[in-house]
Image (spheres, rainbow, N blue to C red):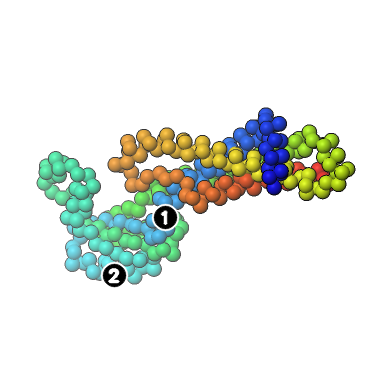
Amino acid sequence: MVYYLKRAVLDIFSNKFLNIITITTIALSILVLSSFILFFENAARIIEPWNKGAKIMAYLKHDFNQSKLSELKLEINNMEQTQSVLFVSKQQGLKQLENSIKSSNFFDNLKDNPLSHALEIRVKNTIKNWDEIKAFAKQIKKNHFVEDVEYGQEWMGKFLNIFNFFKTTGYVMSGLFFMTSFFITANTVRLAFYSRRKEVEIMRLVGATDKFIITPFYIQGILQGAIGGIAGLGILFCSYIIMCSGFNESISPFILFNIKFLSMKYFLSIILFSTLLGFGGGFLSLKFFFKN
């Protein structure tokens, strides 16, 4: 095994230019792929609470009589999509607003409570489709006690559009870079094989098996894939540190989440994927060669 590894390393250094191109291409492929995975993983953290049970705020009319509260809660609880209903009085709402804004000057000058009573409605976990939540919110709004509903429809709708756009773009770009890396790796291994063709023929004449001859080339492909994967993730991590060091500090008081780097599960999966990419390119190239 040590011989195979030494032979693969020597082949990489003897064809530096081709191997640098191959490793760079793999690194760029992994950078693109891991960037989209990073986006999807953080986006999923935002969407996850909605998948676990979306929250709809139903704001009641200003003249709402609290004696009708039991009737209203019963009506909404009887809806198939409802998980729970919590009444939030306008006094509670104002208190929550004071705690979130923490601006005493504004509230000191406030004579009347401009808020209205509200109901916090949790949606059942079985509803994961945005259109279903939208339809449920419209159904609640039809109630004659309800003035308006809020369920993050504007920002969540826009976010989901961006999410789907990035998803499609990610599939296309990752696929293109994958194919490019795969064939460049295959061609690099093939060129390395051709450069040692005479040596291979002599080895065959003296009785060397095909396995003994091609194993260093497989290891070469594996090394190219592993190095390219580590390089791509390294570039992404450095970019993440540079961007987030200032980003989280400057706007952290105004956001509800922090951007996190790839989890270990995805990190190891990407390294494995890039290694298999390098191996697959070499395997295809050598299989084609020995067929001919």
Residue drawn at x 35%, y 66% as measured from the top left? 83
How far apart are the two marked residues, 1 and 2, measured between alpha carbons?
A: 28 Å
Hey, which quadrant is residue 6 in on the image?
Answer: top right
Count up the numbered dots: 2
Is any atom of residue 110 visible in this view? yes
Q: What is the crowding at mark 1: few (fewer than 14 residues within 10 Å), some, or many (at least 20)?
A: few
Residue 148: x, y in percent?
29, 54
- Say what amino acid the circle numbered 1 marks: Glu
Q: Is residue 278 visible?
A: no
**Type of amino acid under label 2:** Leu
Disc number for residue 168: none
Q: In the displayed structure, does residue 89 sit left or right of residue 256? A: left
Instruction: Determine which quarter of the picture holds residue 218.
Output: top right
Residue at the (37%, 62%) spot, across then down: 123
> What residue is pinned by disc 2?
74
Residue 167 location, x and y as percent? 53, 46
The one nearer the camera, 198 or 291, is 198
Nearer the viewer's eye, disc 1 or disc 2?
1
Residue occupying image coordinates x 52% and y 47%:
267
x and y, in percent, of residue 204 in the image: 85, 44
Q: Quadrant for residue 219, please give it.
A: top right
Q: Mark 1 or mark 2: which comes first in sequence?
A: 1
Residue positioned 86% across, 39% down in the render: 202
Residue tagged 1 = 48
Q: Taking 103 as reference, is 75 left or right?
A: right
